[in-house]
Image (cartoon, helix red, strand yellow):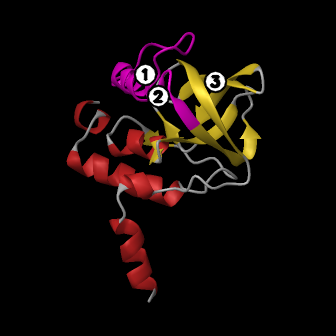
Amino acid sequence: MLLLLVALVLARPWEELGSEEGPASATVVVTRVVDGDTVEVQLDGAEEDVRYIGVDTPETVKPDTPVQCFGPQASAFNHRLVEGRRVRLVFGAERRDVYGRLLAYVYLDGRFVNAELVRRGLARTLTIPPNDRFAGQLKRLEIAAARAGRGLWGVC
């Protein structure tokens, strides 16, 4: 029975990975894309930086750090996907990082944005407990992207 359940979970398309249900969430408009894994939103009348949980895209805007391989592509994809769009943020168990950014799983029209970045080879997984709710699913997507040579896995 357990093997059947595992097989069913692995067979689900990426859009169904992760759940929009969570202990704390908000629907917001992305006002600016910072890079491949960080956006700015208006939340409760304040501008907030939001860092995607579970993923790490190559750097493009980090001070004193050169632009990394496939960073521009990851950033451009995130711009096209979410900038100016209404998204649902599902906050992690730990709500903010050491830089004060909100930490969230991001959904656009039911699509799990964090997972799509990994699936396309635009991001690596980054698991930092206690925000590890979808670490297994994201890791499986990363392995598949690497094996297929997608995105950064085929170039960097």
Q: Is residue 89 magenta?
A: no
Residue that badge 1 annotates: 79
Q: Amino acid at mark 2?
A: Val
In the rendered view, would you say 120 is above or below 80? below
Q: Which mark is residue 134?
A: none
Q: Amino acid at mark 1?
A: His
Could you say where residue 114 lies in the image, as x and y percent from the top left? Answer: 48, 42
Q: Which circle's residue, 2 or 3, is located before the other in the chain?
A: 3
Helix, strand or loop at label 1? It is: helix
The residue drawn where x is 36% and y is 75% is: 7
- The residue nearer to you, when weighing 23 against 120, is 23
Q: Are marks 2 and 1 in contact (CB under 8 Å)?
A: yes
Side of 152 where 148 appears, left or right: left
Classify 10 Å Cα crowding around label 2: few (below 14), some (14-19), many (20 and above). Answer: many
Residue that badge 2 annotates: 82
Could you say where residue 45 lies in the image, as x and y percent from the top left? Answer: 77, 21
Label 3 to label 1, Cα distance in Å? 13 Å
Q: Is residue 68 magenta?
A: yes
In the rendered view, would you say 94 is above or below 82? below
Q: Is residue 86 visible?
A: yes
Label 2 to label 3, Cα distance in Å? 11 Å
Classify 10 Å Cα crowding around label 3: few (below 14), some (14-19), many (20 and above). Answer: many
Could you say where residue 21 lies in the image, as x and y percent from the top left? Answer: 63, 56
Q: Amino acid at mark 3?
A: Val
Could you say where residue 84 lies in the image, as x and y percent from the top left? Answer: 50, 21
The residue drawn where x is 35% and y is 58% is: 13
Q: Which residues are magenta?
A: 58-87
- The residue nearer to you, when weighing 21 against 10, is 21
Q: Which circle's residue, 3 or 1, is located before the other in the chain?
A: 3
Residue found at the far bottom of this picture:
1
Residue that badge 3 annotates: 41
- The residue nearer to you, when weighing 101 against 146, is 101
